Image (cartoon, rainbow, N blue to C red):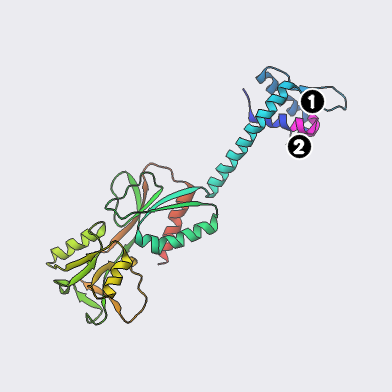
C-alpha cells in the first residue's frame, strides 16, 4: 500500500541523488530512508532506483519515474489539503449568514469589519429576507427578531424596545399614553415578524390607529413620518435618527414588550471556527451598543 511518507522519501532521494543527503534533508537516519524505499518497492512490486554503488548518484528506474511523476501530484494535493485545513482552523473559509434590516444596518457592519481585520480572506455571504420564520437550512447563522422554531440552537442577543416617532410638537412630554394613538394615522411595517405582535398589543388595549402606509424599509417609515403622513412605533434598533428640528421620539405608557433579537444555527451541527468567531464578535458588538 502506498504511503505519502514513502513518496516524499522517493522525491527527496531523486532530488539529492544519495540516500545520505536525502536523510539529511528529511531529518531521518540513512537506514530509515533505506527502509522506506524498500517498503515502497515492496508496495509497487519493483525497483524504483538503480544503485550503481560508490560515489555515483542513484538513478530512477522507469518504474520510479512513473511513480515520482504521479507521486508529486499526490504530495502537492496533500500539502494543499493540509494548508486548507490549517487555514480553516485559523478561521478562514466561508460563512453564510441570514440577516434582516436592523441587524444589517447596526450590528453586522462592526462584526464584518472586525472579522475581515482578523481574517482578510474570509468569504462572508449575507442573505437578507423579511419573513415570518426564516429557515436555518443552508445557512451557518441566522439573525431573527424572535425565537426561531424547529431544530435549531439559538442565543438571545438583546431586547430592542419600541418607541413612538412623531413630528415635534405633536405630543407633549417624553412619555405618551398608548391610548393616545387611537384613531391617529400611522406609517408601519408589514404585519410580519414582530410587527404583528405589536399590532395585537394595540388591539388588546382598544387602540385602533389608521395605518395609511406600510413599507419594509425602515428609512421609508421615518421619511413618511417626517413628511407628516403619520406617526410610527418602531424598535430603537430600526431607527437611524439624526438630531433635527422635525422629529423626536417618545416612550409609550404602557410600553409594548421589546422585540427580542436572536442568533440561531442548525442544531446538532458542528460550527466552523469562522461561524463561531462571528457569534463571539456579534456578542461583543451587541454589548457595545
- Note whether 190 is above or below 55 in the view shown: below
Q: Residue at horizontal 78%, vertical 36%? A: 24
* Separation (CA) of disc 2 from disc 1: 18 Å
Q: Which residue is mark 1?
A: 59
Dominant secondary structure, magenta? helix
Query: Image height check: is 183 above or below 51?
Result: below
Q: Which residues make up the magenta segment? A: 12-21
Is residue 269 something that shows in the picture? yes
Residue at point 65%, 20% (across, down): 43
Q: Nearer the viewer, mark 2 or mark 1?
A: 1
Tell me if mark 1 has few (under 14), some (14-19) or many (20+) residues whose alpha carbon lies within 10 angstroms of its own.
some
* Left or right relative to 285: residue 47: right
Q: Which residue is mark 2?
A: 25
Q: Residue at x 39, y 50 (%)?
A: 141
Q: Residue furthest left?
A: 206
Q: Is residue 9 left or right of residue 148?
A: right
Instruction: Give neighbour class at mark 2: few <14, some 14-19, many 20+ (Cα, 10 Å).
Output: few
- SS state under label 1: strand
Amino acid at each position: 500500500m502506498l504511503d505519502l511518507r514513502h513518496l516524499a522519501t522517493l522525491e527527496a532521494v531523486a532530488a539529492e541523488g544519495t540516500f545520505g543527503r536525502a536523510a539529511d534533508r528529511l531529518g531521518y537516519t540513512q537506514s530509515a530512508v533505506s527502509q522506506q524505499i524498500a517498503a515502497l518497492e515492496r508496495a509497487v512490486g519493483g525497483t524504483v532506483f538503480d544503485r550503481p554503488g560508490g560515489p555515483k548518484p542513484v538513478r530512477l528506474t522507469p518504474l520510479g519515474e512513473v511513480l515520482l511523476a504521479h507521486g508529486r501530484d499526490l504530495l502537492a494535493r496533500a500539502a494543499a489539503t493540509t494548508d486548507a485545513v490549517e487555514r480553516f482552523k485559523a478561521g478562514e473559509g466561508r460563512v453564510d449568514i441570514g440577516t434582516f434590516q436592523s441587524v444589517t444596518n447596526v450590528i453586522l457592519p462592526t462584526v464584518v469589519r472586525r472579522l475581515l481585520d482578523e481574517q482578510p480572506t474570509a468569504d462572508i455571504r449575507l442573505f437578507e429576507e423579511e419573513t415570518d420564520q426564516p429557515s436555518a437550512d443552508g445557512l451557518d447563522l441566522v439573525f431573527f427578531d424572535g425565537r426561531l422554531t424547529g431544530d435549531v440552537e439559538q442565543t438571545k442577543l438583546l431586547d430592542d424596545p419600541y418607541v413612538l416617532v412623531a413630528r415635534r410638537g405633536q405630543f407633549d412630554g417624553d412619555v405618551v399614553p398608548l391610548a393616545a394613538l387611537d384613531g391617529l394615522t400611522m406609517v408601519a411595517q408589514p404585519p410580519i415578524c414582530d410587527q404583528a405582535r405589536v399590532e395585537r398589543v394595540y388591539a388588546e388595549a382598544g387602540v385602533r390607529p389608521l395605518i395609511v402606509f406600510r413599507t419594509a424599509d425602515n428609512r421609508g417609515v421615518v421619511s413618511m413620518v417626517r413628511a407628516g403622513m403619520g406617526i410610527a412605533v418602531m424598535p430603537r434598533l430600526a431607527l437611524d435618527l439624526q438630531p433635527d428640528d422635525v422629529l423626536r421620539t417618545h416612550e409609550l405608557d404602557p410600553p409594548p414588550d421589546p422585540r427580542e433579537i436572536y442568533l440561531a444555527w442548525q442544531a446538532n451541527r458542528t460550527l466552523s471556527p469562522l461561524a463561531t468567531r462571528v457569534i463571539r464578535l456579534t456578542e461583543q458588538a451587541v454589548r457595545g451598543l
